[in-house]
Amino acid sequence: MKACTKRCLILLMLLPIFSMGQEKVILDTDPSYDPDDVGCMAMLHTMASIGECEILAMINSTEHQESALSISSINHFYNRPAIPVGDYKGYAEKINAPTLTYDQQIAKEYPRALAQWEDAADGVQLYREVLASAANRSITVVIIGTMHNFYGLLQSGPGDYSTLSGVELVRAKVKQVVTMGGNFIDGKGLDRTNWGGADALCEYTDWSCLNEERNRMCRYVIDNCPAPFMASGWEVGCGDYHEANYGNVMTGQRLKQLDAKHIVRRSYEYHFQQRGGDEDISRHSNDQCALHYAIRGEGENYVAQRDGKITLTEAGECTWETTPDGKQGYIQKKRDKNLIAKEIDELMMGDVPTLDDTPPAAPQNLGFHKRRGKIFLHWDPAYDETEGSWVVAYHIYYGKKQVGIAYGTQYPIPKKYKKPEKFVVKSVNVAGMESE
Ligand SMILES: [Ca+2]
Ligand SMILES: [Ca+2]
């Protein structure tokens, strides 16, 4: 229990029995205009501390240079600086985040492992590398940003890390995709979040109109994702827009109880300061509800409709219908919104774990294989026995010099290294500590 103090012990006791499995999670996020993404990262760190999940990677989907940096700062704050951070590299240009967004402020104020945004791994390649070495149907993908990276993954062909295409990789390795988006309850199907918005919403506000690129990518993902796909629609976390909900799940105000320099409180307060005042920092919880369901399942909080097919139109309207072999569905709230909010707040306020200062086990059974004319190093996955710690990467040494990093259990050897016997692989835990 080294990484777990009193508050998290209480959380552990509250933990329902049904949720004791450990989810291996890739978080696909867009921290920038809405602090609920930071809330989700905090929840994930808390749930990792109490053994509910391991975070294999966090991937940014925004066009901002500072978004991936802010993710790195958050992981550093939670003493897990070595969690791999990916970034969507397909934008024509990465721009600076506007002053009103908290990502640029967090990147400015807090230390981190990622020195500059260019150093973040390519999000699509990071997906491919992590999935290639994962056990079959073991990965939970949580998308609380746009679909840019996941769309890129589904579009990808065979490559260095796997002979499988992106679609085949997802079919083989992904247990479920849970995403924030859509709208399934009020019959209109209008969503003004990650799925591209809807044409019909343009009448309401100036920021919720159809975003054609988001909509196109999202339609592709919905039509081509071979893994079970669950949506937490707009109306789950923030439903008052159409009055067809059981009310907003409002979270965040209790963050005021944390230290003023706590990175989650700071993100929320900065966000609201830039919009006129930080007395009330409560926020609807679209992203948190999706993540909450992804890790803990329906439980007392949600009810899921499964075994169907989602359709998203070019106008941005979505519908769902049961189909014989459908793997898609959506969730709704089952419990009182305030009880769900309380659980989310507690997870967002979980203790920061202590830095894991004991090394992980060294990787075993180092070997070589040849594929498509390339020589690969491979090894068995290594573990860290410390509670709330796990292995996130492997450092590749050639002699005494580190020449690469792997986020799975294989590494394609560049041709310039002529003596395979000189390679040494060390596992790296969340704290960045190497094995012997
Ligand atoms: Ca988000
Ligand atoms: Ca350890």
Image (cartoon, rainbow, N blue to C red):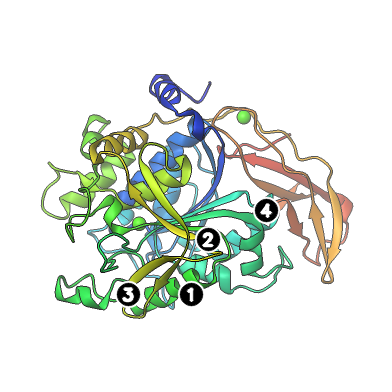
Residue 308 vertical position relative to residue 316 in the rendered view, above or below: above
The earlier-in-sequence mark between 2 and 4 is: 2
Q: Which mark is residue 327?
A: 2
Q: Amino acid at mark 3?
A: Gly
Residue 375 vertical position relative to residue 213 in the rendered view, above or below: above
Spatial CA distance of label 4 from label 1 is 29 Å
Q: Which mark is residue 316?
A: 3
Instruction: Tell whether label 3 touches label 1 (CB within 8 Å).
Output: no
The earlier-in-sequence mark between 4 and 1 is: 1
The earlier-in-sequence mark between 1 and 3 is: 1
Q: Residues within 10 Å of mark 4 (few under 14, many from 20)?
A: many
Instruction: Tell whether label 1 touches label 4 (CB within 8 Å).
Output: no
Give residue 254's position: percent from left, percent from top. Answer: 23, 34
Identified at 42% across, 42% down, the residue is 298
Q: Amino acid at mark 2?
A: Lys
The earlier-in-sequence mark between 3 and 4 is: 3
338 to the left or right of 74: left
